[in-house]
Image (cartoon, rainbow, N blue to C red):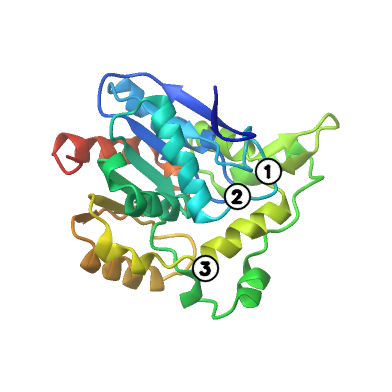
């Protein structure tokens, strides 16, 4: 389904029904809603409704040339939650999406009952890159447009042999498959760099002391930043008012690699009253 969140901007949403506490699932940079398929299916099987969203510029959502700053993308989520009629959902975000949901909770604490930051929310790129130019040089994505879709899927499966099919399919959904059988990323390079610049400028550590809602940090042992990640998680845990940390021994895309296990952690924090 499509939900209008701003003039000329519709977001594609994958909804699953249930009677329990609702979940909003937010993807990372250059990703898409289907990366949450396994998590959403597990939540639904346990009675929890969810909505996974393609953020602007991504997947099947509108792709305006502007509006990729944190204020605008969190305004998008504000309008989405209102349109869905969700009563204080738990909002889970992965990677850049983790920073987005942290910003959402900081701006609109009354809107959510808690957030889960999945290998994200603590990303502070200025700690690694003192200037934008060095960040851009290191983190500009490789070219994938023009690759054969079949070859790309083989490559993804080789890179992630332990991922379930939902994670592979979700990764393939980051790309448009063109009529000639080749792919192109749904997120253009120009918009990718706009988001990356906003992420480089974002300083989540300035938000931690002011976050009023419960925060579940779910970092992965793999992914970027290596051992420095643990220090960032410790600093966040020390500054946040109500926090729990659950490490996963896995890839950056925990939600794709371990969807059932991650969903069960989210459900457990509802059942145990952490997300009140």
Disc marking residue 67: 2
Q: Is residue 203 visible?
A: yes
Q: Nearer the viewer, residue 23 or 171?
A: 23
Image coordinates for residue 47, horizontal then vertical, percent: 28, 21
Q: CA distance from mark 2 to mark 1?
A: 7 Å
Q: Residue at x 49, y 26 (%)?
A: 14
Instruction: Look at the image and tell me in which quarter the N terminus lies.
Output: top right
Disc marking residue 94: none
Q: Residue at x 27, y 43 (%)?
A: 110
Could you classify mark 1 by the number of other residues whose Cα lies within 10 Å: few (under 14), some (14-19), or many (20 or more)? few
Which residue is identified by label 3?
A: 201
Q: Do the CB atoms of the residues marked 2 and 1 lie less than 8 Å apart?
A: yes
Relative to 204, residue 89 above or below: above
Disc 2 is placed on an element classified as loop
Q: Is residue 28 visible?
A: no
Which residue is identified by label 1?
A: 64
Q: Is residue 156 left or right of residue 143?
A: left
Q: Residue at x 56, y 51 (%)?
A: 29
């Amino acid at each position: 389904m499509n939900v209008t969140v701003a003039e000329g901007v519709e977001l594609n949403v994958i909804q699953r029904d249930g009677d329990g506490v609702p979940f909003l699932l937010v993807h990372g940079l250059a990703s898409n809603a289907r990366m949450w398929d396994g998590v959403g299916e597990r939540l639904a099987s346990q009675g929890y409704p969810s909505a996974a969203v393609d953020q602007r510029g991504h997947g099947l959502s509108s792709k305006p040339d502007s509006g990729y700053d944190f204020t605008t993308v969190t305004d998008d989520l504000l309008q989405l939650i209102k349109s869905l009629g969700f009563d204080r959902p738990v909002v889970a975000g992965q990677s850049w999406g983790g920073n987005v949901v942290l910003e959402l909770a900081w701006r609109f604490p009354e809107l959510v009952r808690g957030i889960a930051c999945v290998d994200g929310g603590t990303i502070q790129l200025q700690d690694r890159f003192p200037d934008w130019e060095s960040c851009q040089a290191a983190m500009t994505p490789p070219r994938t447009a023009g690759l054969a879709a079949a070859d790309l899927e083989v490559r993804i499966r080789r890179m992630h042999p332990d991922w379930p099919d939902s994670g592979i399919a979700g990764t393939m959904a980051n790309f448009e498959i063109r009529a000639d059988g080749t792919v192109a990323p749904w997120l253009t390079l120009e918009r990718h760099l706009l988001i990356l610049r906003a992420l480089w400028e974002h300083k989540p550590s300035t938000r931690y002391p002011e976050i009023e809602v419960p925060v579940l940090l779910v970092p992965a042992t793999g992914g970027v930043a290596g051992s420095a990640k643990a220090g960032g998680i410790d600093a966040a845990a020390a500054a946040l008012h109500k926090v729990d940390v659950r490490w996963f021994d896995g890839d950056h895309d925990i939600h794709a690699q371990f969807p059932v296990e991650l969903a069960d952690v989210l459900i457990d924090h509802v059942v145990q009253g952490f997300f009140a």
